[in-house]
Image (tube, rainbow, N blue to C red):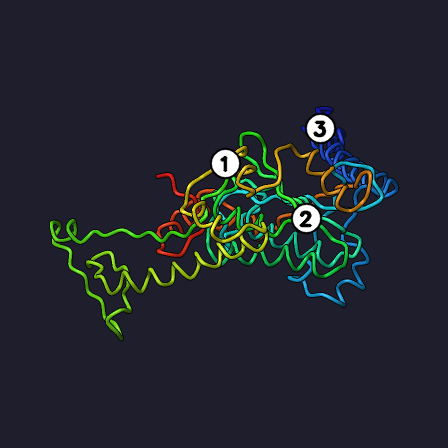
Amino acid sequence: MAETNEKQPGKGKGCGFGCAALIAAVLCIVGFFCLIILMGIGSLMKGKSRFLWDSENASAQFGKDEMPEMKEIWSSGNGDVKVVRIPLTGMILLNNDSPFHTGTADQTLRAIRRATHDKDVKGLLLEIDSGGGGVTASDILYQAVKTFKAEEEGRFVVAIMGDVAASGAYYVALAADRILAHPTTITGSIGVIMQSYNVKALAEKLGVSDVTLKSGKNKDLLNMFQDVNEEQKAIVQKVIDASYDRFVSLVVENRNIPKEKVLPLADGRIFSAVDAVEKQLIDGIGYFDDARRALAKLLKEEDVEVYRYEEEASLMDLLSGSGIGFSSNIHQLLQDQEPRLMYRMDLR
């Protein structure tokens, strides 16, 4: 049989372009991780970025919910005293978290708890931009700030308001030692609201009937398919009044204003920053740097070193409904339709 000198396709060429591309990809990945490690080491050497301090000892003292793991990032300032800036944005509702939206009430609560158990943290800068939210959620955040101060002697909190810090957001700010607002801030809206819908007339037109089995005549308060009678209105109003009285009492207590002066201001009306200062609802007008200086003054320091916290979303967070914008928005929409007591500014 005659020998042939023809070369077979692919023979004698090694793995060719595919292998070269694979090697290049591996080298890029290795280089990327090396860069991250070097940057992390550099930051740690400067003392400006660090993960949970003394994590082994801390984990032994506190549970994960008491002291969540968060990355600590140096934000601004070069003082000798450590403080943390904590945002609170959007509707104040708990158990409504999303890794894509910073400053939710859940994240704010975790951050306050994290700071509370760090003995090095001597102050908080609360950056509030919210129209309020749930009565209980607002009260929990208020108490968390109070607990932060009570846990270690000599701690202080300064709140700085953004576009709006009204109703439940103002309620939370009351826990601060000093409240500042931007010149364009809207605040106030001291009061309580509960809303529902009544579709009885529409349901009758559509031939839809309500079937409700209940244990007592008031078990279906605010049933949207039934008229609300005066007795039921009185029941709901009594609960609203109790939450309102608590709100007013906290304004009196924390702002040191006589109740007879607070009541005319606590009818749900909103105030500009200038009006709020005049009515003693806040302490002054300024910007973030002014809030930082105010906190330094309370701590008797020339300057403070400000940190912020970052949370890393897990794969499960990203895949879960709370991490997907559409699902999160639907969840928020459904929660907004539930009749509930709210410390919330309503401009609809």
**Mark 3, secondary structure of its residue:** helix
What residue is disc 3 on? 17
Q: Position of residue 345 (x, y in %)?
A: 43, 44
Q: Position of residue 185 (x, y in %)?
A: 53, 34
Mark yes or no: residue 68 visible.
no
What residue is disc 1 on? 186
Question: Amino acid under label 2?
Answer: Val
Label 1 environment density (alpha carbons within 10 Å; few <14, some 14–19, many ≥20): many
**16 lies left or right of 208:** right
Q: Quadrant of residue 347?
A: top left
What residue is disc 2 on? 157
Residue at 71%, 50% in the rendered image: 156
For this rendering, which residue is in front, 311 or 155? 155
For this rendering, which residue is in front, 238 or 261? 261
Q: Nearer the viewer, mark 3 or mark 1?
A: 1
Whole-Å distance between the Cαs marked 3 and 1? Answer: 62 Å
Mark yes or no: residue 113 visible.
yes
Give whichever of discs 1 and 2 has the lower sequence position.
Answer: 2
**Mark 1, secondary structure of its residue:** strand
Label 3 environment density (alpha carbons within 10 Å; few <14, some 14–19, many ≥20): few
Residue 251, placed above or below residue 80:
below
Whole-Å distance between the Cαs marked 1 and 2? Answer: 21 Å
**Disc 3 to disc 1: CB gap under 8 Å:** no
**Mark 2, secondary structure of its residue:** strand
Q: Position of residue 307 (x, y in %)?
A: 74, 43
The quarter of the image holding the N terminus is: top right
Give whichever of discs 3 and 1 has the lower sequence position.
Answer: 3
Question: Amino acid under label 3?
Answer: Phe
